[in-house]
Image (cartoon, rainbow, N blue to C red):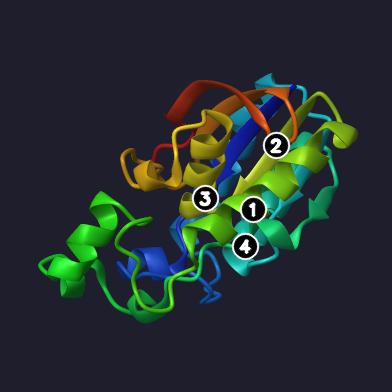
């Protein structure tokens, strides 16, 4: 089955360059326009269902997209963004030269940061979600967050959570994974970070 992964549109936190995690920012004005354009782009696919994180930036994106596609939105708490602990509310510029942060980017499994969701718990959460997806259809659109998109890709591709930050996932970018088996959920990474909206 195919799982299309859409990162939420630009939020007010994104606009300010902040680590958001569990912080619940809504979409910016630009983000709402991005979500509309993403919805138009996604008309070419025939999805069985839209599933979204409950956080505002993802839910608003999902609702705009689903309205364009004529679908309902299923909310799943397992799609909430990673909690970024001591990084939350800080700007990327504030921490880019911080040695502990750079080590965490290099390998978040070996070099955890204070308050950040443990990688093993993150993988368990993502695997639990993926094992349930097949009951919802053969082609599902998942609207979630950059960290969760990466975690799903690393899980399905069996890349290991140590590689979580090795690739980019932009706002309203689309990625596709194909599930081939469950328990644990494994399959193929078809593409990553395809733009769906240009402003």
- Provide the residue designation for mark 4: 80
Check if mark 2's residue and mark 3's residue have beta carbons within 8 Å: no
Q: Is residue 114 left or right of residue 125?
A: left
Badge 1 crowding class, 10 Å Cα cut-off, few under 14, some 14 to 19, many 20 or more, is some
Q: CA distance from mark 4 to mark 3?
A: 23 Å
Q: SS class of the residue under badge 2?
A: strand
Question: Residue shown at 53%/56% (left/top)?
Answer: 120
Badge 4 crowding class, 10 Å Cα cut-off, few under 14, some 14 to 19, many 20 or more, is some
Per the rendering, the mark at residue 141 is 2
Q: Is residue 135 left or right of residue 58?
A: right
* Image location of residue 189, percent across then percent down: 52, 23
- Provide the residue designation for mark 3: 33
Q: SS class of the residue under badge 4?
A: loop
Q: How many marks?
A: 4
Q: CA distance from mark 4 to mark 2?
A: 15 Å
> Residue reaching furthest left?
97
* Image location of residue 51, percent across then percent down: 75, 47
Q: CA distance from mark 2 to mark 3?
A: 19 Å
């Amino acid at each position: 089955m195919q799982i299309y992964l859409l990162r939420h549109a630009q939020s007010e936190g994104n606009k300010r360059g902040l680590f958001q995690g569990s912080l619940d920012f809504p979409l910016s004005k630009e983000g709402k326009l991005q979500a509309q354009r993403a919805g138009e782009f996604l008309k070419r696919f025939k999805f069985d269902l839209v599933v979204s994180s409950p956080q505002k930036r993802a839910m608003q994106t999902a609702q705009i997209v689903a309205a364009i596609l004529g679908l309902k939105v299923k909310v799943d708490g397992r799609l909430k963004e990673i909690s970024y602990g001591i990084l939350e509310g800080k700007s990327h510029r504030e921490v880019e030269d911080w040695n502990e942060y750079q080590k965490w980017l290099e390998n978040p499994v070996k070099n955890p940061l204070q308050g950040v969701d443990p990688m093993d718990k993150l993988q368990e959460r993502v695997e639990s979600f993926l094992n349930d997806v097949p009951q919802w259809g053969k082609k599902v659109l998942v609207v979630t967050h950059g960290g969760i998109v990466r975690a799903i890709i690393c899980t399905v591709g069996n890349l290991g959570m140590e590689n979580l930050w090795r690739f980019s996932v932009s706002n309203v970018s689309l990625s596709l994974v194909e599930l081939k088996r469950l328990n644990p959920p494994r399959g193929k990474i078809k593409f990553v970070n395809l733009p769906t909206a240009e402003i």
